[in-house]
Image (tube, grey):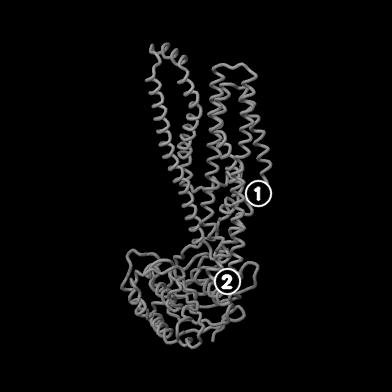
Amino acid sequence: MKTIFRKSYYLIPSEKRKKLPTFFFVSMINSFLDFISIAFLTPFVLLIINKEKIDTFLITNFDIRYEQKHIIAALIGLIVFYLLKNLIQARVTFIQSKYLYSIGSVLSKDLTKTFINGSYKNFYLYDKGKLIQDFHKLPMIFITNVLSPIYNLLSETIILLLIVSVGIYLNPYVTFFSILFVLSCSTILFFLRKNKTKYFNETIASSYRVALNNLMNILNGFIEIKSSESENKFIEKFNHSNKEHNDTMAELTTFKLNNVRYLEVLTICFIAFTIAFVLLNSWSFKDMVLLSFYGSAIIKIIPSFNKIINAYVDIKSNKHAVDILTSYQFKNSISKSSIPFKDSITLKELYFNYPNKEVIIDSINLEIKKGDFIAVTGKSGCGKTTLLHIISGLLSPTSGTILIDSEIKQKDNFLSFAYLVSQQSFIFQGTILENITMNKTKSVDLKHINELIDALDLRQWLNSQPNGLRTNLVLDSKSISGGQKQRIALIRALYTRPELLLLDEATNQLNETLERKIMNFLKKKTIDKELTIISVFHNSNLLDYATKQFSFNDQNLFRL
């Protein structure tokens, strides 16, 4: 538990960590009000009913007699106190919840920020289904099933300690044996249920991830699943994993709810012990106050113990959330290279392989002059895309040097003057304009965008859209063709006015007439020295647009 507490503390973002003292101070108000309402309710009622005691007290201290109006005033005061108490506690609860869930929001943002600013190797290696779970769901699990239970554990323990303190003051003997009895029963209960919490911690995380991945398989493979008539197989696989996860959650819920059954037995034993004590011993008014206090306290003790046990179960069962979140320490953060591209880029003896995999690039040497149009061909999977990734700065070579106008490019620096367009065009949930500007909607150069739309022959399609550039596209939209997606991606790239354009079969879904129109447009920009292009081609008929032509074979480039 100590390790979980320590990790949880450091998972809280620094700006939120500074507010922890305020959070606990406000939280103590709730605990204190709960304690007051428990400790003094029954004694207060008993004293009001005992006219002789109150009458003596009022005459002795205030020289007035106890009348009915005093009872009414006292009861009104009691109602007002509980009304104000609950109004204050409702506000405090709102502040607590807002604070805790804001931690989840910041944590999700920081995880996503760390990932998107990190190395492409992390993107390449990680399971996307797992990332969705870790970045979106795990922070909320951390808040609801770890941080909130930690707070409950601490606050309910403080309430119990206050109750015990008053009990010791009223009758140390009874309180001591009550504590001994409760601690013994709690220890046995925790020991018997310890292994079960470990099971929940291991099973919940894995079963959810499997169910999520099976669902993503269905969403991503719609066409192939329909074509192969495999709908039932995929549904069965998803249903099996989802049912396993839900069954585990049902088991955990039952496990937590059953704690109150054990506590009920504990309570009956405690009441029996108390009655036996009263019957076997003479007792005074002070003992009556003690018993009335315990009568009120037990109303709170049962749910408090239940909260403490459930908090323990939640924390231990969701330890995986803390472990996974603390494991995200992406290194190799990519920054933008500030080196300008004036004349040439030179690749010297580049060598690359992924960890524990065969060599992809071996001793490549290449000079890229300003205004070059370089074409690269080669069979699928030979390393063409990897080469583009290295040139752009997404990947760093295992060895070798990249020179920009004789200045060595540092590793893990993305070229600020380059833009890489992949063959799988990225379309996200947003308007066409947002997809072109990548959500940069301030100071938009609409004139430049419209020029590119005309140059890439997308005007007719755009005019057919209900809201033009303001038309919404859905995530990975199937309502537009592959060729339209590729042209949107090209417009997006050219809109940034890059000096180096890297094309990874970026026009392979266009017909040859449209491809040639676009290549003519790009070729003119290279002749005017506005653009330098390295393009991986699938269509050998387009090689004549290139000033330099290379074939990628045997981990190296060969001039054609």
Kindly tell me whether residue 369 is visible in this rendering: no
Q: Position of residue 232 (x, y in %)?
A: 59, 70
Residue that appears at 63% across and 73% down: 359
**Quadrant of the frame with the N terminus:** top right
Q: Position of residue 79 (x, y in %)?
A: 41, 30
Quadrant of the image occupied by residue 458: bottom left
Q: Which mark is residue 361?
A: none
Residue that appears at 53% across and 21% down: 289
Residue that badge 2 annotates: 231
Viewer-nearest residue: 407 or 351: 351
Between the residue at mark 2 and the residue at mark 1, the CA separation in whole angstroms equals 36 Å
Residue that badge 1 annotates: 198
In the rendered picture of this protein, how many numbered marks are placed on residues? 2
Q: Earlier in the sequence, mark 2 or mark 1?
A: 1
Viewer-nearest residue: 37 or 299: 299
What's under tag 1, amino acid-wise?
A: Lys
Viewer-nearest residue: 38 or 131: 38
